[in-house]
Amino acid sequence: MTPVEEAVTHSVRMFSSGFSFCRAYRLTCPSDALERELLDALRVALDEKGFRLEEVDLQPAPAKRLNALTERLIPAGSSADPPHRSPPTVLAVLGLDLLEGKRHDAPTYPFRSRFQFDRQYLWLFIGRDRERLGRLFNSRALPLYQAAMDITPEAWRELR
């Protein structure tokens, strides 16, 4: 199985497991070409399961675009807060690793406060830099600490 096939299979299995709690996953993809191949294959596989895939590319203005995404999220407890979207929608957020570091991470704080209670979407965060993406989700001092499970294919884990 290729790394793209592995990532697609694992993602679809995880997203198909239900809506009992906000499901969020992250993976590091080593190139633009592989990212496009992954997203195209994932779109087909999710469509077969009755899911939608929406891509949100944070480049070229990661802070501005993450703030715009945060504004789209319906606050928990709001009268507009649905139990889940129909059809279920996987939101693939591309380039979140660009927000790692003290000079860049400010937008992750308000994002986490809405994202952690979001029931509209299933989440897939895709980044190019494994170390930066890892620090965003593995540092106790940051708001995204343990917010997404790493599903990066083994073959991509050591690539830079």
Image: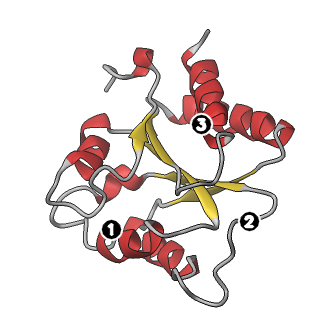
Depth check: give the residue in front, 26 or 117: 117
Q: Disc 3 on helix, strand or loop? A: helix
Give residue 128's mark.
none
Q: Position of residue 89 (x, y in %)?
A: 71, 56
**Nearest to N terminus: mark 2 or mark 3:** 3
Q: Disc 2 on helix, strand or loop? A: loop
What residue lies at 24% left-to-right and 37% top-to-bottom? 131
What residue lies at 45% left-to-right and 62% top-to-bottom? 60
Give residue 85's mark.
2
What residue lies at 41% left-to-right and 47% top-to-bottom? 148
Above/below status of 103 relative to 53: below
**Residue identified by numbered label 1:** 108
Mark 2 and mark 1 in contact? Answer it, CB < 8 Å.
no
Taking 26 as reference, is 32 left or right? Answer: right
**Nearest to N terminus: mark 3 or mark 1:** 3
* Quadrant position of the C terminus in the picture: top left
Callout 2 crowding tier (Cα within 10 Å): few <14, some 14–19, many ≥20: some
Q: Disc 1 on helix, strand or loop? A: helix
The amino acid at mark 2 is: Arg
What residue lies at 41% left-to-right and 17% top-to-bottom? 154
**Residue identified by numbered label 3:** 14
Depth check: give the residue in front, 68 or 116: 116
Taking 37 as reference, is 158 left or right? Answer: left
Callout 3 crowding tier (Cα within 10 Å): few <14, some 14–19, many ≥20: some
Above/below status of 10 relative to 118: above
Marks 2/1: CA–CA distance: 23 Å
Mark 2 and mark 3 in contact? Answer it, CB < 8 Å.
no
Above/below status of 42 relative to 91: above
The amino acid at mark 3 is: Met
Taking 5 as reference, is 127 left or right? Answer: left
